[in-house]
Structures are given as structure tokens and as C-alpha cells.
Image: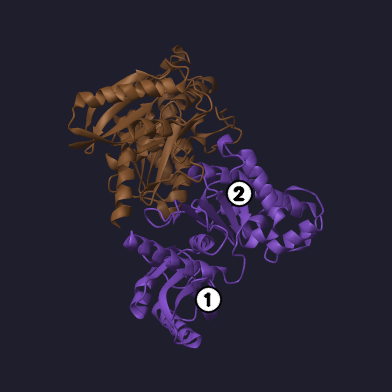
Chain colours: A brown, B purple
């Protein structure tokens, strides 16, 4: 009888889930549409049914030992999704309680970036680390902070919102209602804004002048930069400068061994890593210089969000066993 | 037989120590001069002898169970004092190893601000908190960060240097070699610099125009502000603005229940607390608003550094007992 964990990644469009064994192999993977049901209870019912169907497909010799969920605006401490702007259900969704009832196993939830950090620790490049940070670069910028080998959730369950540290209080308008947050500069949307600002401020010719804001993607900017387009290259340099310089403040908080960059922008490799590292080193307080690595995530693949979510369960069981055994 | 802990506070001028029982009562307190000996081994020898003398004075019915040390540039992970600018011994001082040899009990060291945070958790106002931050306002600005009930030391033992997060990369010159660090604005020295900048920029009459930079103290500025001096009042407002706004970034890292202000500037009470709270709330990301308290430390007395240092031992023993008992 082998132990199986369900990892679930709830996104605005689709909800992916996988059945994962303890070595991190995804034995079964499927998805449902997130937005079909107007009542979240119906959504959870459909998800539960799909999981049970998957369980029966992987066979009767497996035992479900827990369910981990990554979701936007998830609160680990309360087991809820709270006021998620890109989901259709308003208010507070007590998803953990409902699924615990249905499956009678430990269920835990956290936001996507915390799940990515936990996945990095259990399955990725942080397996021997106790103090590190994961930055997820998507439409926005998310983060997960690990100190003393534990994910930092904070008193209210909303720690590690590094997308919303402030670069400039009179800077770019942010979806959170303030101005100048890091993710308005460093994210897929942030680098697009930087390209458009550069096209506005300078006369430099650029192949990006022919592309609308809606059509422009990080991949296009990266490809232009690789072809030598100066605006595209400068946009990556500026993005790395803003990220690297601001991460110096983060290092002064938790003194991590490494900062991992995950997803979206990080796929542009040296275009983003080189300026980020350089500006971080230049900005760091002397006692930290040469000691903090900026690395690509070890989970850069399609299953990463599912692995990240499932790793919440591994971590939970590890800690509980430890406490019982002493 | 009652258990006794030695708490030691190593400062640039004098080294204070106390014998503390487990309830936090200081049974004996004394000090030696820090800078008498050119060899640090002679300093430690004198300190050890003074401690043993104190032990014999409190009587034979006590048992030493550990020694905690707070010191500048202390590294908890390595048990060392490293390159402390305001001590006469250069390089790396392996003080923990030496004292362990002499006393044969657990010995631990950390910097003053981390000791203050631990003291707040064991004896102060954070006894029921798991996630909080202590800011020590002295000549500079120190800090200790507690997450998940544990002090954050970081991978290299230098976490929580919040005096060196950057307000403005083109700002005031800092002793660390960079510019615009928080402590160049928010500290005893920082508020003096702010007063002098205001006296330079404006024509406003002020009783502080008659005092030299060397003679000016936080206490004088506070007393002037209480008498209604506009420059002194503005200097506190500006200091609280810089601190409050920057702490919004810190909240986005660790989502603490409370931020305690300790020592120096914090003794000016509402002059510093009111603007700090107001600008923190104004700057916080909406999900954090109304949830983070800014409070005076519960250890505002002469014995605080000794209690803080001794609490390192309590925490160490608590955690070890927990692990043994399971």
C-alpha cells in the first residue's frame, strides 16, 4: 500500500490537481474548469468527484494521506480563500473544512508562492536549506519566505507579500490601491510597463514599437533583447536593477542562503538573473556580500504548482511525526 | 536548589552582568570595564572571575544552568563576536567556546537587539506572541525578528539588520559605507541630523539653534518639542514618518502581530509613537491595516539587556526540553 497525496492548484481559469507519491512523482493529473459553478460548494463537489475518480484509476493499492492546495488569497492559518479578485466567489471560502469532511485526511491550503517555496524545500533545490526565499514572477510578483526551516505565515497568515514592498511612494499605480509596489516594476506586467515607458521617454527605434500593450508578452521582450533590440535589453536591465536593489532590503530582514526566481520572467535566464545579481551585490550591506545566491527554481515545469501544493502535506506530516517521536 | 542564569551585556565602555532566576528577578548585578585588557582572553578571565564571585555571594543553594550574552556584532550561529567596530579586539572572538570551557554549561550569544527581542518574548509584552519585531533605538537602530515563535538568525547569523534597509539610495551617509540607511534617519543620531537639516533648510527660530551637534541629545529635542518648539516637533514627526512608512515593507515580509520600540527615542512616547503609527497605517497594504500594533517595550529598565541576554538560555532550554519530552 503506497501513500498518495493530492496536490491542487486553483487558478482563475482552471483548477489542476495531481496524485503525487512521496518521492514527488505525479501518478495522475487532471483538471476542471474553475468558474463553472456560481456556488463554490458545487465547485468543490466537482473537484472532490474528479479526485475520487483519479484515485480509483491509480488503483486500490494506494492510500490517501493528505490534500494540499495552492490558491490565490489563501490563508494557511484559517484554511480559507479570502476575497480573491480573480475568482467568482466573493467573501470567505472555508475550503479546508469542506474537503476535510469529504476525505477525512489532513487538508491544508496556502497561496501559490508559499506552495512554490514549500515545493522548493521538499522537491527542489532548497532541500538542504533552512533559510531561503522564493520569488514567483507571473502577472504579479509573489513570494514565500522560509526561516529556520519553516514557512513564515505571520500572525494573520499574510506574510511574504514582497510584490507589495514599495520602490517609490510616488511610483506606478498598483492593483492594491497604493503606488510604487515592487510588482508594478518586476513581473510580466511590470516589464511591459517599463518597455512602454521607455518607448515614451526615448526616440530609440525598437521592434516593440509595432506591438500593442495587450499583445506584448515577456517572451516577445526576451526574444527582442536576444536579437539585440536596445529597448528590450534596457527593460530587462532596469527590471533586474529594481529587483536586485530591493532584495537587499529583504536580505537585511531574513539573511537567506538563496533567493530562487520561479516562472514567467525567470525563464528569460541571464537577461534577468545577471542584472538582478549584479545590483543585489552592489546594494547589499557589506556583511552580506558574496553570501546570497540568486538561483533558478528547481521546479520549472508544468507540475510545479501541484508538487508545491502536495509538499504542504509532506511538511505537515514530517513535523507532526517529529513532535510525536521527539 | 534554585536555578540561576547569567546574563551579560557587553558594551563599548562597560560590561554588565547579572544573576537571574527563572522568574526574571535579578539577584545580583555588577560590571567590569570592557576596554582594560588588550588581549580578549584576559577580559574574559576577569569577567569569569567576577561572575564566580557573584555566584558565591548569592549563596550555595543556587545552580548555574546557562550563560547568555548580548554583544555588538555577535553571531549566534558561530558563538563569536566578529569585527566589532566599538570594541578594541579586532577579528573574531570565540567567546562562547572559552566560557563553555570555564563553566561547563550552555553558553549562547547574540546581538543586543536580538537579545532584546528574546527578552520581550520571555519576560516582556510578547509572552503570548509568536510573530513580532523589536526595534531598538539607540545611537543606531537595531532589530530582532521573531517568526513562528523563534528568533530569526538567518543562514549566516546576521538577520534583522533593519537599521540598514534603504530609505533613499542617494540619502544620508551611513557608517556601513552605503547611503540612506534607515538608522541614518531613525536613531538618536538620525533625529539630530534631521534637526540640523531643518535648521539649515528653514529660517524658523528654534531653541535648538543654540546647541552644537555634539551637545544635542534626543532628550533635549523631546523637551523642546514638549515646550512647543516647531523644529523639534517637526523632527519627531519626520522621524516617525520615515519609520512608519518603512515598517510597512517589514510587515509585508513577516506579518507581525506587534512591533515594539525599545530604548532611546522610544522614551519620547507619543512624540514618536503617534507619527510612527499614523504613517505605518497610511502606508500599509490594505490587508494588513488595523492589524499591527506599535507598542512600547515591556522591558524599559536598567536590567533589560541583562534580562534579554539571560532569556537566550531560557529559550534554549525550553526548546531542548520540548525536543526531549516530545
Q: Residue at x 66, y 55 (%)?
A: B191
Q: Nearer the viewer, mark 1 or mark 2?
A: 2
* SS state under label 1: strand
B237, A308: nearer the viewer: A308
- In which quadrant of the rendered image does the C terminus of chain A lie? bottom left
Residue A289 visible, this orientation: yes
A148 with respect to A84 (left or right): left
B294 up-or-down from A48: above or below: below
* SS state under label 2: strand
Which chain is indicated by disc 1?
Answer: B
> Where residue B274 appears, x then y in whole percent?
70, 49
Residue A185 visible, this orientation: no
Q: Which mark is residue B293?
A: 2
What residue is disc 1 on? B16
Crowding around mark 2 (Cα neighbors within 10 Å: few <14, some 14 to 19, many 20+) is some
Q: Are marks 1 and 2 on the same chain?
A: yes
B231 with respect to B120 (left or right): right
Marks 1 and 2, Cα distance to the nearest angstrom?
32 Å
Q: Residue at x 60, y 71 (%)?
A: B302
Quarter of the figure with residue A232: top left
> Where residue A184 appears, x then y in whole percent?
51, 29
B248 with respect to A146 (left or right): right
> Where residue A231 appears, x then y in whole percent?
44, 23
Amino acid at each position: 500500500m503506497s501513500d498518495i497525496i493530492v496536490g491542487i492548484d486553483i487558478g482563475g481559469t482552471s483548477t489542476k490537481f495531481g496524485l503525487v507519491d512521496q518521492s514527488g512523482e505525479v501518478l495522475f493529473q487532471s483538471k476542471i474548469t474553475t468558474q463553472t459553478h456560481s456556488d463554490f460548494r458545487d465547485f468543490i463537489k466537482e473537484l472532490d468527484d474528479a479526485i475520487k475518480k483519479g484515485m480509483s484509476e491509480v488503483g486500490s493499492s494506494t492510500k490517501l494521506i493528505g490534500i494540499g492546495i495552492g490558491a490565490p488569497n489563501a490563508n494557511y492559518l484559517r484554511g480559507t480563500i479570502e476575497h480573491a479578485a480573480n475568482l467568482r466567489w466573493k467573501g470567505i471560502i472555508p475550503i479546508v473544512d469542506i474537503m476535510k469532511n469529504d476525505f477525512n485526511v489532513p487538508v491544508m491550503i496556502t497561496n501559490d508562492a508559499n506552495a512554490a517555496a514549500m515545493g522548493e524545500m521538499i522537491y527542489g533545490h532548497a532541500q538542504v536549506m533552512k533559510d531561503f526565499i522564493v520569488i514567483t514572477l507571473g502577472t504579479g510578483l509573489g513570494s514565500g519566505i522560509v526561516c529556520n526551516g519553516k514557512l513564515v505565515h505571520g500572525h494573520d497568515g499574510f506574510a511574504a507579500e514582497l510584490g507589495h514592498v514599495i520602490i517609490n511612494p510616488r511610483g506606478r499605480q498598483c492593483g492594491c490601491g497604493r503606488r510604487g509596489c515592487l510588482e508594478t516594476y518586476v513581473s510580466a506586467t511590470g516589464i511591459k510597463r517599463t518597455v512602454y515607458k521607455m518607448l515614451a521617454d526615448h526616440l530609440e527605434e525598437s521592434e516593440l514599437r509595432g506591438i500593442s500593450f495587450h499583445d506584448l508578452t515577456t517572451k516577445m521582450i526576451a526574444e527582442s533583447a536576444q536579437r539585440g533590440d536596445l529597448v528590450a535589453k534596457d527593460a530587462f536591465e532596469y527590471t533586474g536593477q529594481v529587483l536586485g536593489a530591493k532584495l537587499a532590503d529583504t536580505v537585511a530582514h531574513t539573511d537567506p542562503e538563496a533567493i530562487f526566481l520561479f516562472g514567467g520572467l525567470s525563464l528569460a535566464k541571464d537577461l534577468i538573473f545577471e542584472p538582478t545579481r549584479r545590483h543585489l551585490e552592489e546594494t547589499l550591506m557589506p556583511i552580506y556580500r558574496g553570501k546570497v545566491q540568486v538561483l533558478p527554481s528547481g521546479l520549472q515545469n508544468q507540475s510545479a504548482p501541484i508538487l508545491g501544493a502536495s509538499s504542504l502535506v509532506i511538511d505537515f506530516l514530517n513535523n507532526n511525526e517529529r513532535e510525536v517521536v521527539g
